[in-house]
Image (tube, grey):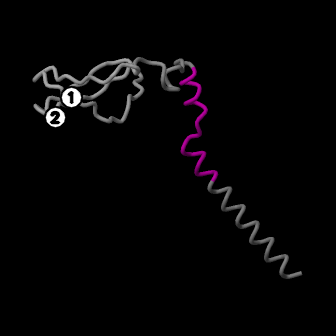
Amino acid sequence: MPTYDYVCDVCGHKFEEFQYIKEEPLRKCPECQKMKLRRLIGAGAAIVFKGSGFYQTDYRSESYKKGESAAKPSNTDSSSGSEKKSDAKVSVSEKASTDTKS
């Protein structure tokens, strides 16, 4: 059931009301009893996620988390990867220089 915002043009009273979509908007202000109540245009209802189970990490068991952390590369692996890249650059430049000589 959606929540609608209402405001009274006479007394300025503002409130929210739970109503079915097919129901007619309220017209009578509960504070001043005048027929000057109007329904405000709102952003609409938002989805509210309550409880656990809405995130990928909520479903992971402790053994899975331990295995995943063990599979991640350490900082020492990243430094050896940069050395391999620099070796590849040298070999490409050497190959280019030998191609131009012949």
Q: Position of residue 61 (x, y in %)?
A: 54, 18
* Residue underneath mark 2: 9
| Depth order, front residue of 22/75 | 22
Mark 1 or mark 2, earlier in chain: 2
> In the rendered view of the protein, which quadrant contains the C terminus?
bottom right
* Prevalent SS, magenta region: helix
Total marks placed: 2
Q: Is residue 79 magenta?
A: yes
Q: Is residue 75 left or right of residue 19?
A: right
Q: Is residue 28 magenta?
A: no
State the SS at label 1. strand
Looking at the image, which residue is at 79% across and 77% down? 97
Crowd rating for badge 2 (residues with CA inside 10 Å; few <14, some 14–19, many 20+): some
Q: Position of residue 13 (x, y in %)?
A: 14, 29
The quarter of the displayed image where residue 26 is located: top left
The quarter of the displayed image where residue 25 is located: top left
* Residue underneath mark 1: 37
Q: Amino acid at mark 1?
A: Leu
Q: Position of residue 36 (x, y in %)?
A: 18, 30
Q: Amino acid at mark 2?
A: Asp
Task: Answer above or below: position of 54 versus 40.
Answer: above
Give the residues drawn in magenta, as a range: 64-81
Task: Answer above or below: position of 10 versus 50.
Answer: below
Tag 1–tag 2 contact (CB < 8 Å): yes
Image disc number at residue 82: none
Looking at the image, which residue is at 58% across and 51% down? 79
Q: CA distance from mark 1 to mark 2?
A: 6 Å
Crowd rating for badge 1 (residues with CA inside 10 Å; few <14, some 14–19, many 20+): many
